Amino acid sequence: VLAEVIKAFGAPENAQRMEEARDNACNDMGKMLQFLLPVATQIQQDVIKAYGFSSDGEGGLCPRRAGSSGPAGAARAPCPPPLLAGVLKFARLIKSYESQDPEIASMSGKLKAMFLPPMTLPPHGAGTGGVAAS
């Protein structure tokens, strides 16, 4: 399933959708969440729904967890949007297998790289009062 999800991101129409979302995000993390993540989620959902990772739930409010405190009429937390529910379930399952299977770990990393921007660290010691090596 994971290989099919990766393959779906490479399909010309999906690659174009992702590129447009990246352009709209302008490498801004907040905009990535706004523009890129929904497109990536839709692409994944289109593949994984055939394997039982449907968008279960209908949005709304999640039932209160057993043992949670608060009065009986207290507000409940909102559930993830239905589209996101299946993708989150799939992501948790993949995460649970990453440590057991290097191939799954590799494919998971490849998938994340498709829609998460590369993290760059500031130069060590630059502007932080650190001592530069000579």
Image (cartoon, rainbow, N blue to C red):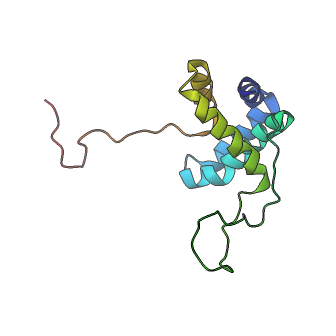
Residue 34 occupies which quadrant of the picture?
Answer: bottom right
In this view, the residue farthest toward the right is 50
Query: Is any part of residue 20 visible from this angle?
Result: no
Name the residue nearer the viewer: 21 or 109.
Answer: 109
- The percent position of residue 27, horizontal first and vertical second, equals 55, 46
Name the residue nearer the viewer: 52 or 17.
Answer: 52
- The quarter of the rendered structure image containing the N terminus is top right
In this rendering, would 98 be left or right of 41?
left
Where 83 sits versus 18, above or below?
A: below
In this view, the residue farthest toward the top is 103
Residue at (65%, 78%) from the top-left corner? 74
- The percent position of residue 82, horizontal first and vertical second, equals 79, 54
State the count of labels.
Answer: 0
In this rendering, would 87 be left or right of 99?
right
In this view, the residue farthest toward the front is 67
- The percent position of residue 118, horizontal first and vertical second, equals 51, 36
Residue at (78%, 66%) from the top-left corner? 60
In this rendering, would 106 be left or right of 72?
left
- The quarter of the rendered structure image containing the C terminus is top left
Query: Is any part of residue 12 visible from this angle?
Result: yes
- The percent position of residue 54, horizontal first and vertical second, equals 82, 44
Where 70 sits versus 109, above or below?
A: below
Residue 87 occupies which quadrant of the picture?
Answer: top right
Residue at (27%, 39%) from the top-left corner? 124
Where 57 sits versus 39, above or below?
A: below
Residue at (74%, 27%) from the top-left corner? 10
